[in-house]
Amino acid sequence: MQVYLDNHATTPVDPRVLEAMTPYFLTKFGNPASSSHSFGWEAAEAVRVARTQVAALIGAQANEIVFTSSATESNNLAIKGVVADRAGAHLIVTTIEHSAVLDPAARLEAKGAAGVAVTRLGVDREGRIHLKELAAALRPETVLVSIIAANNEIGVVQDMEAIGALVHAHGALLHSDATQAVGKIPVDVNAWRVDLLSLSGHKLYAPKGVGALYIRADTPLVSQLDGGGHERGLRSGTLNVPGIVGLGEAARLAQQEMAAEAVRIGRLRDRLRAAITGGLEGVRVNGSSDHRLPHNLHLTFEGVEAELLMMSAHEIAVSSGSACTSAKRASSHVLRALGMSDAEAHCSLRFGLGRFTTEAEIDYAAARIVEAVGQLRPLSLP
Ligand SMILES: *Cc1c(COP(=O)(O)O)cnc(C)c1O
């Protein structure tokens, strides 16, 4: 049996999403920018509906949604688009951001001449930022604060409402990379008081290659991709209509099913944790238990290299870092931010449950992990 427990890296397309998309490849293939015939009108109407569906999932207005190719692009547009050429601008991010926030921030900082300063806010052992530290980091010249709503490795959720109130009171703009939160837990751009929010299709059962950026009305933002003036001039490029239709349908399904799905997945996650920690000594759970996606379990197996464990239990698809860093061999910056040593980080695995995870799969995965750790541990003794 193959068990896919890497749903933070990507999710399969929901068959209902694929069904909604299919006509937009074949018969309804028009360009929504073609305003002179019905092929164009049909495509434009589909994009309009999808925009409404995505907006509804996060409590936004449809005209505040800009479609992009990915959360990576959304994060780049949000950060570079706000900071733009503002000399002396100050930017605050956390140390547990995805590289799609950390790297644009670092590039702005490296430009030096423009004088962009970046503060990287640390987290506690549970993976949570402290409001007092955020308050202390805010400066008069802080233009943007970017906080990951739900972390892609340890699943830890930040208190976005309190963060939003604090940043708003200070007068800075707030961006959230909510790629792992949207569709999994309630997201409300007004309750959170965010000005910008990134999401990605392939993390919520829509295809890869489509994402969106929520931009609160009147937020000053400089386009990073100029051309035909699509998306109100903020993101030129012919729209990925099938992908956008898929993202819309995925958002609609998530809105309907999220509450029940979170309960079901949370129970499965707890079952997985209980089976593994009940069957083995020396297993630690990483990240806050109270403020966490129900979909995520992150464990350290004392004395067992995660890479070996994954090879030994290879039918269980999990990850030892985020998908993006697992090509490199450096230990995860998120785990180091929690205060874990490189050795501990290299003995850690992320389990990401999803819509299609079954109880039988969880029981099988737990049994295989317990068995593999049992086999590897004696080998790793001196
Ligand atoms: C997956 C992910 C991204 C990148 O999304 P893409 O659409 O693949 O570019 C960014 N941030 C977080 C938190 C993610 O989980």
Image (spheres, grey):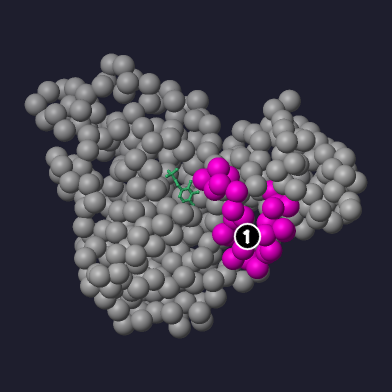
Is residue 346 one of those drawn in magenta?
Answer: yes
Question: On the rendered structure, is 313 left or right of 29?
Answer: right
Q: Position of residue 29 (x, y in %)?
A: 26, 22
Which residue corresponds to the image point at 72% horizontal and 33% vertical from the top-left? 314
Image position, residue 269 (x, y; %): 70, 47
Is there any visible trace of residue 93 in the rendered image? yes
The foreground one among 186 and 133 is: 133
Residue at image position (49%, 30%) is: 13
Find the magenta span and give its range: 323-349
Image height of 305 relative to 344, above or below? above
In the displayed orientation, state which residue is furthest to the front.
Answer: 382
Residue at figure coordinates x 72%, y 58% from the top left: 343
Q: Amino acid at mark 1?
A: Leu
Query: Quick one: quadrant of the N terminus?
Result: top right
- Residue nearest the viewer, comparing 233 with 87: 87
* Residue for point 21% across, 57% down: 222
